[in-house]
Amino acid sequence: MHAGDDDYDGVPYVELVFEEVDWSETVEHVRNRSGRLSRPGEFDVQPEWATEALADRQRIVGSASSRSGLTVKVLGWSSSAPSREAGRRGRLLKVIVAPKDHPPTERWWAATAMEANEADRDATRRSSEHQGHAGRGGGRGRSAAG
């Protein structure tokens, strides 16, 4: 079964815990996105920022829609990452992880992380409006299904 519409192996997305994230196999992959993709303007993510986004209490969690069905996509805020706007702090990130255990516990393999794209930012805004959240903080996270 793995990553379904509303849950992962029977665990609802809103109940997933990202306590231990192992970046050992992907740290350089994430830190060098711009060089790897030959896109000098691409945002390179530090694993610490991605881990912070996974801990965002207003994160949105759902299937990453991978062919394997093993990965989870998390849209979360990192207040430590540099902002897209001058004079501000923080950035919305998209983090892809796979559980080390089935059903998932708090232990995860990090697959990749990147800046959230416009569609991700729109989904986050829509979800916040739907949930009645005006800002950051509070809550346990939200399912991508809404």
Image (cartoon, rainbow, N blue to C red):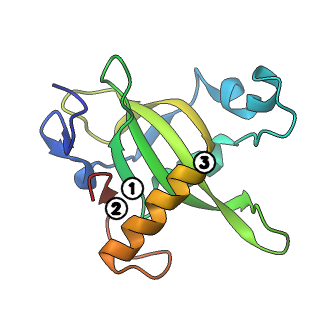
Where is the C terminus found, in terms of image quarters? bottom left
Indicate which label's residue lies in the foreground, 3 or 1: 3
Residue in the picture at 40% in, 47% down? 19
Residue position marked by numbered label 1 in the rendering: 60
Q: Secondary structure at mark 3?
A: loop
What is the three-letter code of the residue carrying label 2? Gly
Residue in the picture at 19% in, 45% down? 6
Label 3, label 1: how far apart the Cα atoms are: 14 Å
Indicate which label's residue lies in the foreground, 2 or 1: 1
Residue position marked by numbered label 2 in the rendering: 141
User: Residue 133 in the image: x percent, y percent?
Assistant: 39, 79
Q: State left or right for residue 20 relative to residue 50.
A: left
Query: Camera-side residue: 48 or 45?
Result: 45
- Number of marks in picture: 3
Task: Reply above or below: 137 against 12.
Answer: below
Where is the N terminus found, in terms of image quarters? top left
User: Few, some or many C-alpha atoms within 10 Å of disc 2 (few <14, some 14-19, many ≥20)?
Assistant: many
Mark 3 / mark 1, whichever is N-terminal: 1
Label 2, label 1: how far apart the Cα atoms are: 6 Å
Residue in the picture at 38% in, 24% down? 66
User: Residue 142 in the image: x percent, y percent?
Assistant: 31, 60
Query: Camera-side residue: 24 or 71?
Result: 71
Residue position marked by numbered label 3 in the rendering: 117
What is the three-letter code of the residue carrying label 1? Ile
